[in-house]
Every structure is written in structure tokens, then in C-alpha cells.
Amino acid sequence: MPAVLEVEIGSTARLECSFSIPGNVSFTSIEWFYVNHGHSNRVRLCVITASGARIDETEYSERLSVGEDKALSISKVTRQDNARTFICRVGADSQGVGENHTELSTYKIPAPPEITPNSAGIPVQSNDMSEIAQCTSENSFPSPNITWYKNGEPLLQEEDKTKILTTLVRQSNGLYTVVSTLFSKVTREDRNSLFHCTVHYWLQGQMRTKDSPRVNVTVFYPTEHVELRLVSKSKVVKEGDDVKLVCDADGNPAPVFSFYKKEFPQLEDNWQDVTSLADTNSGVLMLHDVNKSSSGVYRCQTLDLDDMTQHEGDVELRVNYIEGVQVKMEPSSPLHEGDSVRLSCSAHSPVTLDYQWRDARGRKVADGNQLLLSNLTFETSSNFSCKVQARSVPGLEQSKQVAVAVQGKPRIVAISSPLYVRQDEVINLTCKAIAFPRPSVQWSINGTTHEYVDNQHIASNLTVRVSHDLLRAGAMCRVSNALGVSEKHIQLLDQKTSESKGIIIVAIIVCILVVAVLGSIIYFLHKKGKISCGRSGKQDITKPEGRKDKNVVEVKSDKLSEEAGLLQGANGEKRSAADQSEKYIDLRK
């Protein structure tokens, strides 16, 4: 039997009694006893003989059982079973009696430790040691030990610096609850320190441990340094941006924040209070849509209410801007077609500027702060814009427009003439012109007019019914302004006449095409030998032999002289009138 048998509280303890008897003699009885720690009186638990086992009435009678191997089992081991000695005595008649014993050692593994940090916060100015945290371990046996650690290093009791108080509570079931409280003085550096506790207990002859979670405690300390930071989406601040000024103070709790501003240049110590624009709790001053006047030196000031000390932090805000964009036109007098004009663009900014010219459609026409326009026409008239931008500040730009208006008498650029119409139909007559100053359009006939104006362009539409007089005389468009008059005539043509002429022309073209096709066929047949021409004055178109005398058409001509001229040979040879008097075409097939 082992000298000591360790069993966890609540489980079953199995006590085995191994023995041997010389001569292979059988035992007569096996008796189990227990003895309380520090006593000598034995209490029999049971006796085992060849006929069976008999359990005595004891405090164990309800929890005892005997196995086939004569081992004794004790269920639901309790705290009270600890340190009791159990004795096995074996009797064998002539061989006498032998016994052995084992001590029962019970244990309960402690629950994981729970740590509770100080939630109120600890001031570094306190002269007394403050409670850091409390560590609790429940339901253990025997009672465990608790050790404290800061940042992984063990903490020991140290006068006027560290103190550890431990309370041991024994519960009704005999298990222990251990409560350990850590007291210590803190410094600013402890704001980042991590504390935890460890429970140490013995199990099967070895020291085991369980750790609690690591916790941080709130440490209060005064502000020593203040920094004011400028936060913006872009590296360089430009007008229209949103800028956030953040005041960082290293005190806890955060101090009371105040904000001030001083204009450039910094000649006088004249600060303007802008605290009303800030969130004094978070120390943030938000500036929306900044402009030139937002530039200056900003100051964040803190007040520690514990010792009434003040700390400050400054930052400069320089807002890049473009202002005073102007476009000058030389000459500034009214412009006429053929003139030249120079446009000059200027602006003011703390950074270098680039200039670019664009037309009314947004197309780039030139770089530089000057634009020269030569040989002006009405078509040149437009709105030009000078785009000013800062290359070193992305997104910083402004534009200024100028109107270049070329003056002159009207010029008619489009007219609906000639126009094919039918009498009594309603038609639209169009007259388009370009001019400046804006002209007026007049028609030589009455009707309904609609005008459309786009810069120097004007278009007039006249709706009118076609009469006999209108068809004969046409219409006149007259465009005029203070500088002159232009007019053009619109010719109207009768669509019926034009259609008749068109039909005749088509008929002539068709006839020509038919004659050409017939001529091509005859020429083709002649080349193939289907048509033979002799000098006898008669021609046959060959048919089968049996039908040569039928279907003959005789062609006679009295104009021998004309035919004689027409029927000259290829070499200028003339044929006699007798040879030309009769011509026969054989149509037999």
C-alpha cells in the first residue's frame, strides 16, 4: 500500500490491500480500520471472510464498498477524510496476522483567480498607499498562496511602498476562499502598467499555478506638456479646406482647454479668445472653409485645477489663397473686325502662380498671363477665361471671365434660297446672320416670325403661305444694326414646273439608254457573224434553209444622194445609186 494516497474532494478513493501468505495458505479474514489524525483508537470499517464482506456501522457505512479484489472504495471523499490513516489487517490461522496502512490526503484545485482593479482611479500626488486591485481564489483545499506581479515582475512587501493583505475564509464545506489585496504608491509611468495575481497550490507533490487576467488601473497625474497639432486632409492648406486643431495634453484627467489666436504679422502680443469655437472637453478646435483671414498663430492653454498650473502649445496656420484676379483688355475701346486685342491677367497669392487661357467651351488656347488675339472677326467674339492656379498647392485655383465683343455691320451667313414650293402651301423661310451690336431682322413680306439669339448670332424664321405674287417675286431678308445693313433675296421656285422638266429629262435619258442597248446588240450579232452585209443592196438575216423566202421586209429610199453619202465605204469609197436603191432586211429565223 502507498504511504500516502492523494484524492480530489468529491471523487472516489480506492484503497487496495495486496498480500501474500507462505505455503499458499488462504486468508481467513481481512479487516479494514481507520484512525483519525493524532489519535490511536482504531475504528473498524468492515470485515471480509470467505463467506463475504460485512460493513460495520460507522460514518463511512453509506460510502463504503468492497470489490472482488478485496479493495476498499470510499465514494464522495470529503474534506474531513483528509489525513486519516486506513489500515488493512489480514489473518491466516496458523500464519498469524499481518497489516499495512496508507494515509488519505484530500485536495481541491482552486478556481481560477479573479482580479478586480480599483475603478475610482489613483492620484500620483497621494502620500498614502492606495488600493491597486483585489485578487480572489475560491473553493480550494488546502489553502493556496497568492503572489502579485506588475509588468511580469513579482511584488514583495515593502515599507511605505507596497503592502499586501491576505484574508483566508474557511467555508462550511471545509474549502477555503483566499482574498488578497494589493496596496501601493503609483507614478505617472504606472498609467501603462499591467497587474495580475497568481494562485500557487500543491498537487501530487508538485507546485501548480493559475494566473488571473492582466489589468490596468487608472492613474491621475497633472499635465506637464501640451502640444497643439494641425490636422488637414492635404499637406498644404488652401482656402476652402477644413482644418482641425487638436490639443494634446499628457495629464489625466484631461485639463480644461482654452484656445486663442493671433493674427500675422506677430508684432504685438494681441491674442483673440476663440474658445467658443472649440470643444473644450476633447481639446479640438474645428475650422471650416478656411480663408486668408484664418491664417495666424493658434494657442492651446490648459489649466490644472489641482495645482492651478498652466501649460501652453502653439501652432501656425498658413492658408494659401488667390485673390484679386483681374483681366485687362487693351485697347478697351470697341473692337471691329480686323482689329487686334491683348488680354492681360493678374492675381495676388503668397505662392507662385501659373496662368492659362480657355475659350467659352473650356478648351485651352494659351499659357501665360497674356493672350493676343489678331484679325478679329465676329466668330472670334466669345467669353475668354483666365485660369489662375498654384502648382505647389494642388486644387488652389480661380478663374476670371472677360467678353471679347467684335462690332460690325450684320453679315448674313445662311439663307433658305432657292426654295421649291407649291402655291398655297405654308412654308418656313430662314435667315441667319451674325453681328454686334445685336441687329434686327425685317422681312419684305408679312408673316409670323420667330427669332433665336446666341451671342452674336441671330436666326429669324418666317412662316408664310405661298401666294402667286410671292412665288413670282420671292422674299427679301434685311438685317440691320447701328453700323450698317445687309440684305439677301430668297428665290422661290414652283415645284410643279420643276417636276415636269424633271420628267422630260428622265424620258430623254431613258430613250438614249434604249438606243445604246440596241446598238450594242446589233454590234454583238455582227461580230458573231449573224448579220452579213453584201454590196448587192440586199441583206439577209439567216434562217433555216426551208424558210428563206418568207417574212421579208423591203425598205426603199428615194433619197439616193443622201444615202450615197451615208453609205461610203470604209476607205472613202462611194457606192452607186443603183447599189443603194433597194435594201432588204431578212427577218426570218
Image (cartoon, rainbow, N blue to C red):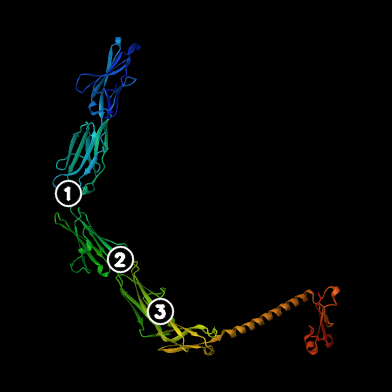
Residue 212 visible in the current orientation: yes
Name the side, left or right, on which 571 lies relative to 266.
right
Where does residue 512 sit, x and y in percent of width and height?
A: 68, 81
Rendered image quadrant of residue 33: top left
Quadrant containing the N terminus is top left
Question: Could you tell me residue 228's position as x and y percent?
Answer: 23, 60
Question: Disc 1 marks which amino acid?
Answer: Val
Q: Examine the rendered structure and indicate whether residue 216 appears above or below residue 15.
A: below
Secondary element under disc 1, as helix, strand or loop, is loop
Q: Which residue is mark 1?
A: 124
Vertically, is 480 above or below 238? below
Which one is closest to the eye, mark 1 or mark 3? 3
Tags 1 and 3 touching, CB below 8 Å = no
User: Mark 2 or mark 3, which is nearer the start of the sequence?
Assistant: 2
As shown in the figure, which amino acid type bears the numbered disc 3?
Ser
Q: Measuring 20% from the left and 38% from the top, which residue is drawn there? A: 179
> In which quadrant will I find the C terminus?
bottom right
Q: Position of residue 202 (x, y in %)?
A: 25, 31
Residue labelled with disc 3: 382
Q: CA distance from mark 3 to mark 2?
A: 33 Å
First in sequence: mark 1 vs mark 2: 1
Task: Give amino acid for label 2.
Answer: Asp
